[in-house]
Amino acid sequence: MSTNISRRGLAVTAMTFAVAMTFIDQTIVSVAAPSIQADLGLTSSGLQWGVNAYLLAMAALFAFGGRLADTIGRRRMVTIGVVVFTAASAMCGFTPAGSLAEPWLIAFRALQGAGGALLYPAALAIVVSAYDARHRGRALATFFGIAGALTAVGPALGGFLAAWTWRSIFWINIPVAVIALVLIALAKTEDDPRPARLDVPGLALITSGSGLAVFGLQQSAGWGWTSPLTIGAIAIAVALLAAFVLVELRTAEPLMDLKIFRDRSFRVDNIILFAASIVFVPVFFFASEYGQIALGQTPATASLTLLYFFAGFAVAAQFGGRMLDRIGARRPVVLGAVLAAVGLHLWATHVTSLSIGQQVMFIVLSGAGMGLLLGQANTDALNHSPSSAYGQATGITQTVRNLGAGLGLAALGTVMVAQFRSHLTTSLIGHGAAAAPAHRLAAGIAELKSGSGQAIRTIPQFVQLDFARATGSVLTAMSWVLVAAAVAAFLGLPRRSSRNAAAVGAQQAEVGGDRDGLQLGVRTELAEQVLDVVAHGVDADAQGGGDLLIGVAGADQLQDFRFAGRQVGSERTRPAGEQRADHVRRDRGVAAQHGGDRSQHLVDVLALGDEAVAARVHCFEQHGTFVGGGQHQHPGRG
């Protein structure tokens, strides 16, 4: 047991180091951007593409990376992703000056993003599969807590490294990658590849659709929301994504099995993740800008404000993980969304004080709410996906999160510019400027970017106050987004996650000797799993089928039986119930090894029609017996 625990801990540590680089690089480069531009002589658009190419490539390829993790092997994909990411990082650090600088930096930043898209879904899938439902929330809370910390630490680390040389912000990934590769080798995580054909049409559609959507959102600040270019890019992206859905529903071996969205909790969790991502990544950007312009701080000092946010995030994430393990996702997600909304609203009302000391409490509260919310919604989504498709499910959730972050930066950036221009115009007129010149001057100032790398100390106080008011409007908008997320979680997520019911019962039995609690959890889990198989079919998953996990409670233990249904193309013409029964009977003799009497319940149930199944499940929950399949008592009652 201790060996398994230490190996799981080693696997989590290895995956944390592997993904550390991807999170740091989301924010670290923006701080060093002025130094990069000055040293290499980049144009403003070239610099912007150097920053955005990374996020664009990741957003476009996450779904592909998740699929490869399931079909080629998770450990293999993590290793490949780390190598690709690190090699691209090193090449970014060696960017030459001159005419080659711009295309060189953009190309290798894009390759960095591709490496991150390959490694992250596989790494998260390894962490998920290493823990059962009883401990998964706590483990992933640690994983996501560290990931959130690295996102927040990125700007501060970037400022420190850039003081030496901007190239070091890329080279720092090399020792991290070496540690990650060593730990991956030591962890010896299991690889369970499920080979499948590559869905080329699906890949082309999801890559181009996601990439174009993020591109259109990124460019909206410069083009304007009413520009034909912005509207055209987003409209084409929507059309490509709609075509992707139609193609995937008709493909035998799809890149993304959209049947996973039949699960209500999975759908709702992704809606929540989309809303939360509108806030989570943009808040770092706007808080840093506020510190530089409204408070006159250097970029490095302004980024330290984010550590207050992380302090609340990290602590609350651990409590959220424990709540998820005990009572499911609904309570921590709703509570987190409400706390974050309240914290952001109160933060918005105090930004005009121009004193960070008066805001710290609300920054911490906002971070705590996001810590309760983000990791638990992500973990719950993975808990509602088949174990054979953890990589694919991670690809879906990360694609959703990237689209949410892209929308948040674009839409909230527009709010920021509009509000800053409006407040500044009013102030300029109040200081004696004529209306027309005031409008022109305010528009010009509002479009300027900070980032000289030095503290901005020459800005008049009324301009700082106007920027603070605009920041308050953005934080208020963020709070309303999280109110919507709280409503979605309250209405859409179950009061108690039935997926964790067996695990909770097992915990009760282990801690308090409560056999009845264990049996209740097992019965609930069995009833739900059987209904899932009847509703979707064991052969619904083209690559190895849906996993049916049945907890069989003996006198003092919970045994797990895994029945992997296999799809045989020639059998599609046979009755579904007959196919399902045969699939279970053929499964590697697992049922026979653990006692045919109990497993016969499953064979009998799967061969029935929907109404008979419902009747049997009801009888099983009430009396512990399947009527009509032999008088088999519930395990542990006899």
Image (cartoon, grey):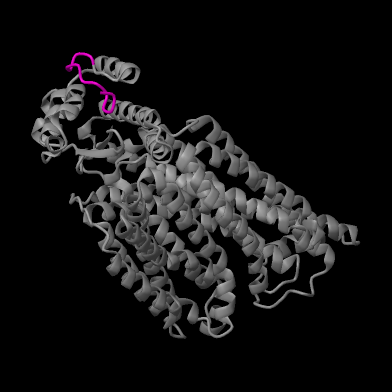
Residue 293: x and y, percent?
73, 67
- Residue drawn 59% across the image and 72% down it: 156
Using the rendered view, name the quadrant where residue 170 is placed: bottom left
**Residue nearest the observer in this picture, 358 or 133:** 133
Up-down: is 94 above or below 106?
below
Q: Residue at x 23, y 30 (%)?
A: 537
Residue 629 falls within the magenta-colored stretch: yes
- Tell me if 492 is positioned left or right of 532 in this view: right
* Quarter of the rendering occupied by the C terminus: top left
Left or right placement of residue 481 versus residue 126 in this view: right
The answer to whether residue 439 is visible is no
As for residue 355 lying within the magenta part, the answer is no
Assign the N terminus to one quadrant of the image.
Answer: bottom left
- x and y percentages locating residue 625 in the rendered image: 26, 18
Find the magenta span and give its range: 627-638
Whether residue 321 is visible, yes or no, is: yes
Q: Quadrant of residue 627?
A: top left
Q: What is the magenta segment's predominant secondary structure?
A: loop
Quarter assignment of residue 612 = top left
The residue at the far left in this view is 570
Q: Percent from the top left, x then y, of residue 368?
A: 61, 51
Q: Decide if residue 98 is on the left or right side of residue 568.
A: right
Q: Whole-percent x and y of residue 187?
A: 30, 64
